[in-house]
Amino acid sequence: MIYKTYTYLIATPLFLIMSVICGSITALAGIVGDRKYVAHYVPQFWSWFTCFIYLIPITVTGRENIDPKQTYVFMPNHQGYFDIFLVYAYLGHKFKWMMKDYLRNIPFIGYACYKSGHVYIGESVSSIAKAVEESRENLEHNMSMCIFPEGTRTRDGKVGEFKRGAFLLATQLERPIVPITINGSYNVFNRNATMVSHHSMELIIHKPIPYEDFRGKSSKVLIKEVREIICESLKLDENVDTE
């Protein structure tokens, strides 16, 4: 009950205020042409601040597996709303999100993401082709990409079916794939929840799969390989601590 009261009276109002401030700064940075520094570090701070004010304990392992000078296609499982904050704040690598087109309609945040160079993707062939080109441009400017291969948040905490499109994109972009396992985000704020719950989160960064290792593989084989890596480190916890 104490935590619920804290989230209503303190954490959530601060989160909303900071979202407007950071979203406005990020959008302005994108308008003036900055898509690499301000447009990265401000959302990173916003994500860290969000985890901090909601008192979420964070554990990160495997950061040594990624080279800050290399660009990758990161592929995390998708447990809940806090996945974005966890990855953005604690991955320790510059990247742009690939996200569904309807997310651009989120007030402040959607426009800020657009102006800062994140890639929106729709269902049409032309939209997918445009997303590939925009992603390639990001990679050429030393900016990695991050894609949720499930395409949507899990309904039960388990890893859902991976969409073939994410792997076709990774193959076309010719960059190493980095599987990422997220634990605990489902317990913090999943798609069925109405408010944030107090629970720890864990980010596990696995070793990259070089492009040379999956070039020529069928998407079905690659999907199975990446999904198995993520699932091996998945921890299912049905108990949500709300106090």
Image (tube, grey):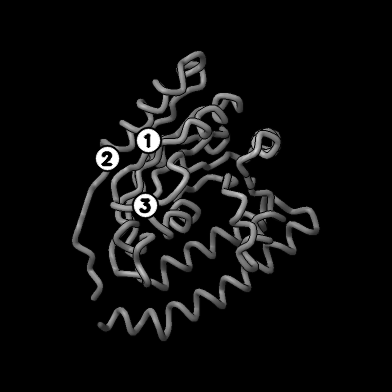
- Crowding at label 3, few (<14), some or many (≥20) Cα neighbours within 10 Å? many
CA gap between label 1 and label 2 equals 10 Å
Q: Nearer the viewer, mark 1 or mark 2?
A: 2
Q: Secondary structure at mark 2?
A: loop
**Could you tell me which residue is drawn at 47 percent across and 44 percent down?**
151
Q: Quadrant of the C terminus?
A: bottom left
- Crowding at label 1, few (<14), some or many (≥20) Cα neighbours within 10 Å? many
Name the residue furthest front: 124
Q: Secondary structure at mark 1?
A: loop
**Could you tell me which residue is drawn at 39 percent across and 56 percent down?**
80
- Crowding at label 2, few (<14), some or many (≥20) Cα neighbours within 10 Å? some
The answer to the question of whether label 1 and label 2 lie on touching residues, with beta carbons closer than 8 A, is yes
Foreground residue among 113 and 53: 113
Name the residue furthest top: 216
Q: Nearer the viewer, mark 3 or mark 1?
A: 3
Q: Amino acid at mark 2?
A: Ser
CA gap between label 2 and label 3 equals 14 Å
Question: Which mark is on residue 233?
Answer: 2
Q: Indicate which disc, 1 or 2, sits on the residue closer to the N terminus.
A: 1
Is 1 placed left or right of 110 in the picture?
left
Q: Amino acid at mark 3?
A: Gln
Is 114 placed left or right of 13 in the picture?
right
Q: Decide: is 99 above or below 178.
A: below
**Could you tell me which residue is drawn at 48 percent across and 68 percent down?**
49
